[in-house]
Amino acid sequence: MQYQDNLTNFQKLLLLRCFRVDRLYRAVMDYVSLTMSEKYVQPPVISFEAVFEQSSPYSPVVFILSPGSDPVSDLMKLAERTGFGGDRLKFLAMGQGQEKVVTEPPNGLKLNMRATYFKIPEEALEQCPHPAFKSLVYVLAFFHAVVQERRKFGKVGWNVPYDFNESDFQVCMEILNTYLTKAFEQNDDKIPWSSLKYLIGEVSACSVTQEHLMVKESRSMTLPFPHGQYPQVELAQNLSWATLKLLRSPEQVT
């Protein structure tokens, strides 16, 4: 059987995909050239004049460079043609002679919670008059750390990749502040636990999971431990699960 003559171009692509993946990129380029036209695989010639016309002082142009490409000479020619050559063109080397700062997420539940909780300013903890606010913020930081730690397990942790970053924690903290302030102003001794559990555990934390099972798991994280079933660990100096009244019963927070 003469495969070269009897197979279509697309069938040849399928064979390459099965047996020679390393040749697939070039084969796709050839296939597009044959079926559509060669112009669809040729890189466009960049017109710096057109780019300059579309830009403004309030919308700068960002060049994303690949190895071997350098637009400096083209920019200098463009500056000469538009009357901005010579001393009017300034090059600022970003990143040279400056301090480099590298940030990475903390490793481990304890360090993760520490990084989250220590970023909360004192005035943020004092903004809510409800006496349970500070304790709930502490538990919220623990919940946020647990959610972040699950990212390490890939799709086993969360079926949709999501950062669960500091802005999400701030939103949850604002929800906590709003509901507790309202309860305090109405002289309501009961904490609106069901509303907080729904807004934080399901809406804020699980709006990206897109799966009912994941929502149930996040909801279970926001539930307090049953009485007497606390982990035998210290959250901080002289502060264990058993001594944190909030986790015994939400209604008993004072």
Image (spheres, rainbow, N blue to C red):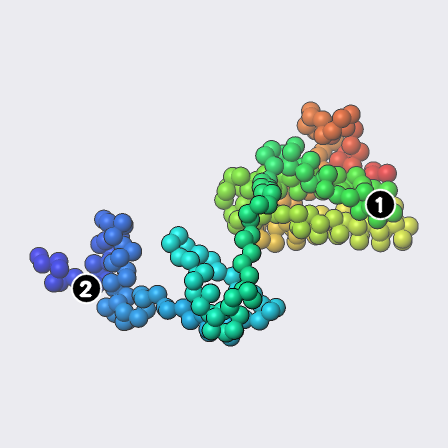
Q: Is residue 83 above or below residue 240?
A: below
Seen at 27% across and 69% down, the residue is 38
| Residue 185 seen in this snapshot | yes
Q: Residues within 10 Å of mark 1 (few under 14, many from 20)?
A: few
Give the number of the disc on residue 8: 2
Tell me the quarter of the image containing the C terminus.
Answer: top right
Give the mark nearer the N terminus: 1 vs 2: 2
Q: Amino acid at mark 2?
A: Thr
Q: Tell me if 12 is positioned left or right of 125 in this view.
A: left
Seen at 61% across and 47% down, the residue is 164
Task: Determine the secondary structure under disc 1.
Answer: loop
Q: Amino acid at mark 1?
A: Glu
Where residue 87 sits: x, y (%)? 55, 65
Where residue 193 sits: x, y (%)? 76, 46
Residue nearer the viewer, 6 or 118: 118
Mark 1 highlights which residue?
A: 126
Q: Is residue 38 above or below residue 117?
A: below
Where residue 191 sits: x, y (%)? 81, 46
Q: Tell me if 8 is positioned left or right of 215 in this view.
A: left
Q: Is residue 27 above or below residue 159?
A: below
Residue nearer the viewer, 3 or 91: 91
